[in-house]
Amino acid sequence: MEHVVSSVAEQQTKTTSEQNPAQRFGTDGIKPLARASFVTRLFMRVVAFVERLNLSYSKVGNPPIYDNAVFPWTKAIERDWRAIRAELDRVLLRQADLPGFHEISSDVATISQDRGWKTFLLAGYGFKSQANIQACPQTWAACQKIPGLITVMFSILEPGKHLPAHRGPYNGVLRLHLGLIVPEPREQLGIRVDKELYRWREGEAVVFDDAYEHEAWNRTPHTRVVLFVDFRKPLRFPANVLNWLLLHLAVFTPFIREGMDNHKAWEKKFYEEAEALRNR
């Protein structure tokens, strides 16, 4: 199995600076989102404080890309990949009707404003799409093995799509990609996290910290799809408590509420159209 990061033994020989390059709290060329709400501004100040705490209290270090041995449950997710792929194939029968990521989360418009990056969301930050979960029960069951599960969706990168360098909004979560559809030539697609490059492989999981600057691209003539999962970063006290609290409060912010409303509107239309087709 291909890995772009060193083995655990090799990582132990690296210096602390090599294992944990400095995280930056912003991305050049991308303006921070402006939100007028006082409550939101206060919330973001708290987030900035907790982010610095998270770096100091991590149980798993702060590398851009992790060795899968750090998270043994990734093996179970990889074993389930064919069942997950089968459910994805059914979803993709209506690929043209799936929403662009920016149509669900308007904050994503800073890096994508077309339908070249699509999503099929099962759950995220307290919200669950029961209809989508019902359509992908084995995917949902497989993800229950992930401690601290936050977000589950299919991330669909259309041919020629490039997501420019950007930083995730918060370093209290880590991200897993499980390769489901990885077209050839693999040299024409990949993701860069800080200075490390990873090329997806079908059936292989990778865990990375999206709080580092990262970018992704698909220069092949075919669609690339991964299972996209966010989960709570393992932290020591007191960072773990503050992290848990922030992630549960996030559901009340405009960022999440707006996304929930957009998804409910899309979901209603998507399944009403499916019902109409069945009743013809």
Image (cartoon, grey):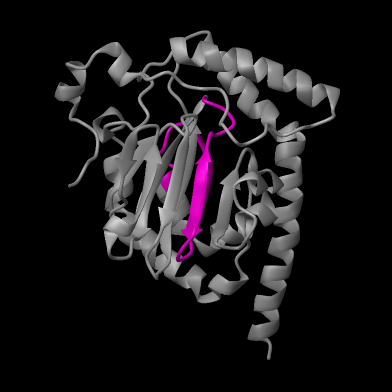
Q: Is residue 162 magenta?
A: yes
Q: Position of residue 93 (x, y in %)?
A: 50, 76
Q: Position of residue 149 (x, y in %)?
A: 49, 37
Is residue 145 something that shows in the picture? Answer: no
Q: Residue 206 is drawn in which quadrant?
A: top left
Q: Is residue 238 magenta?
A: no
Residues in magenta?
143-171
The residue depicted at 65 percent of the width and 77 percent of the height is 274
The residue depicted at 28 percent of the width and 54 percent of the height is 201
Q: Is residue 266 left or right of residue 65?
A: right
Q: Residue 150 is drawn in which quadrant?
A: top right
Q: Is residue 134 left or right of residue 205?
A: right
Residue at the extreme bottom: 280
Q: Does 69 sit above or below residue 139?
A: above
Q: Is residue 90 left or right of residue 134?
A: left
**Toward the viewer: 118 or 222?**
222
Q: Position of residue 205 (x, y in %)?
A: 32, 45
**Toward the viewer: 17 or 180?**
17
Quadrant placement of the C terminus: bottom right
Q: Residue 271 is drawn in which quadrant?
A: bottom right
Residue at the extreme right: 37
